[in-house]
Image (tube, rainbow, N blue to C red):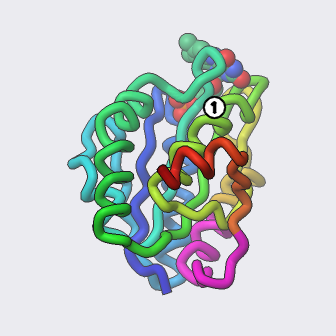
């Protein structure tokens, strides 16, 4: 059981915020302990190291993750990567939440690569809400369901849905 689930996210107009809160409800329903962490209020590497599973959430801002979440990765992705390598720490399950007006895929390309570097296993496809205005009830229901499933998933048997390229594998081994 992945009891402690840290949800690291940013939300400028509340859309991703609603999605993350729905994930947190699902986590709680499954007996887990969610922590909602705004990227600009993060305590740093411990937000990934001191938990059993992670969720990242962002809106699409000009084709990329929102800037404060980018800043989080700028500050902490390499330190986390080094810590997990040095301690030979086990993989943890994660999934992303992606919201956007008309595209939800672009920010995920780099986020999934960076997450893989932190030994986070993509156990579910990224959850999406695409549209104008607040997230739909359907999208929120999926968030909730994924939150429940994340608590229960077995990271050792779940397949990694992220497939690194040969070049990425070589770079990680060096
Ligand atoms: C400055 C700005 C830039 C945006 N750029 C994009 C974009 O490039 N692609 C897209 O699909 N949506 C874009 N959007 C829409 C947001 O991604 C969308 O409303 C998102 O759900 C906002 O999430 P948040 O309120 O949680 O931050 C943009 C919105 C703003 C305000």
x and y, in percent, of residue 81 in the image: 38, 52
The stretch in magenta equals 144-159
150 inside magenta stretch: yes
Ligand 1's quadrant: top right
157 inside magenta stretch: yes
Label count reads 1
With respect to residue 47, does 158 lie above or below?
below
Image-based side of 132 in relation to 18, left or right:
right
Residue at 49% across, 70% down: 92
With respect to residue 13, does 115 lie above or below?
below
x and y, in percent, of residue 38 in the image: 35, 42
Of residues 28 and 90, the one drawn nearer to the viewer in this rendering: 90
Residue pushed farthest top?
62
x and y, in percent, of residue 57 in the image: 53, 44
Q: Secondary structure at mark 1?
A: helix
Residue at image mark 1 = 107
x and y, in percent, of residue 128 in the image: 72, 45
Residue at 29% across, 69% down: 87
């Amino acid at each position: 059981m992945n009891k402690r689930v840290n949800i690291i996210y940013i939300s400028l107009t509340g859309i991703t915020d609603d999605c993350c809160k729905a994930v947190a409800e699902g986590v709680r329903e499954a007996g887990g302990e969610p922590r909602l962490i705004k990227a600009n209020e993060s305590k740093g590497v411990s937000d990934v190291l001191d938990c059993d599973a992670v969720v990242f959430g962002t809106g699409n801002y000009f084709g990329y993750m929102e800037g404060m979440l980018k800043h989080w990765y700028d500050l902490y992705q390499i330190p986390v990567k080094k810590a997990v390598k040095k301690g030979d720490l086990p993989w943890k399950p994660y999934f992303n939440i992606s919201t956007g007006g008309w595209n939800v895929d672009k920010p995920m390309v780099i986020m999934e690569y960076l997450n893989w570097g932190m030994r986070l296993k993509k156990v579910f496809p990224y959850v999406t809400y695409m549209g104008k205005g607040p997230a739909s009830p359907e999208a929120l229901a999926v968030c909730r369901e994924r939150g429940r499933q994340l608590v229960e998933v077995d990271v050792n048997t779940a397949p990694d849905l992220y497939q690194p390229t040969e070049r990425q594998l070589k770079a990680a081994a060096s």
